[in-house]
Image (cartoon, helix red, strand yellow):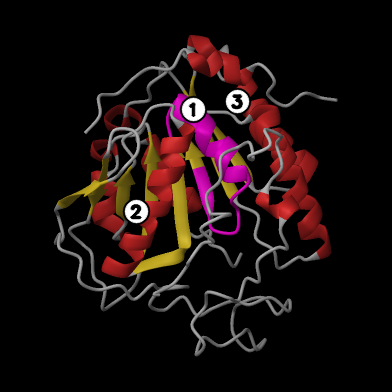
Amino acid sequence: MQTRIPAIILILLLAPACDADGPGTQWDALDTGFDPALDAAGDPVSDAAEDAPADPAVDVPADTPADTGTDPMPDDGCLHPDPAGGYDPSGGSGGSTGPGGTWDYSASSGSRHVFVYIPTSYAPDVTASPVIFLFNEEIGDWRAIADGDGIILVDLDEYNDVEAYVDKLNAVATDLEAGYNVDRARYYWAGWSAGGNIVVMLGAGNQDFLAGTMVFPGTGGDYARTDLEARSTAHASDPCLHMMAMFYACGSADPNYDYGVPVQYEANAWRDWFGYETTFVLVEGSNHYISETTHHIRQQAWDWIEDHNLYN
């Protein structure tokens, strides 16, 4: 698995941040589910702006009841699947790697590796597993969390190659859904440093498939703003349209971020300007890399985001 790499590039991507002015999911091969921040023409146009918004009911099993107003779910006219067994289970079976093992998935891009960790608590007959895709994050920082809550971890094993990230996401997601019972309504991205930047920028244009993001730290700036604003505008017309949740963290001793203020500013901006559910945690005493052993920030992020899915 890859060696952790610091990201000086982070400052460059931060500069424009928040200028005050079944199996299951089968993404189109031409306009795939996970797109780079810039489209083929080189301009920041999101899937949400180019295509009709996805129907949130499309990938829900036919026998999943809509909200009737008699259960604890809100009677708001939107679909709220019963979470028992998973909101949108892929029902995959036949994965060759068992609980506690790591599947070295071969890919054609970048490092040509994707490492998929199957938690010791994986129980496909009980419930579909949420999935956390790691961008410049390490499985070791997440393993205990994954084992505790039955989360499948996907280390994309890239540093700053957006095209390789996209290619790997599409390839591994298809095989993951076929081989394991994953909850397609509970896909999350987690990133550190340059990986955190990509998580916010790329995630902003892929909210049809992404429940939420967690960065330790990272920012999307104006690269993400266009897509986030477009989704917020679409949500105003269709309140059932999902808007991803975003968790931000930064160390108080991180020199790249002037003690975290720009990261906090971005988290607050997406909340105040566009209505996203965001939170920011300043990790006292931490430098650019936030140690999980010392600060337990990833556990805190998971505790905050785990109830967010594509239907809330």
Q: Is residue 203 magenta?
A: yes
Quadrant placement of the N terminus: top left
Residue density around tag 3, few if under 14, some if 14–19, many if 20 or more, within 10 Å: many
Residue 288: which numbered mark, if any?
Answer: none
- Badge 1 crowding class, 10 Å Cα cut-off, few under 14, some 14 to 19, many 20 or more, is many
Q: Quadrant of residue 71?
A: bottom right
Residue contact between numbered discs 1 and 3, judged by CB atoms under 8 Å: yes
Question: Residue 63 versus residue 281: which sits nearer the camera?
Answer: 63
Amino acid type of the residue that numbered disc 1 sits on in the rendered structure: Pro
Return the x and y of residue 128 as percentages of the image width and height.
35, 70
Local SS, label 2: helix
User: Magenta residues?
Assistant: 191-213
Which of the two discs, 3 and 2, labels the residue nearer the N terminus?
2
Q: Residue at x 29, y 60 (%)?
A: 150
Q: Residues within 10 Å of mark 2 (few under 14, many from 20)?
A: some
Left or right, 152 with respect to 283, comes to: left
- Report the residue marked by disc 2: 172
Label 3: element kind:
helix
Query: Does label 1 or label 3 sit earlier along the sequence?
Result: 1
Residue that numbered label 3 is attached to: 263
- 16 to the left or right of 20: left
Tag nearer the camera, 3 or 2: 2
Q: CA distance from mark 2 to mark 1?
A: 25 Å
Magenta-colored stretch includes residue 114 = no
Give the answer, above or below, for where 289 lies relative to 32: above
The quarter of the image holding the C terminus is bottom right
The residue labelled by disc 1 is 217
Q: Position of residue 230 (x, y in %)?
A: 76, 48
Position above or below: 21 against 248: above
Tell me the kind of residue under disc 3: Val
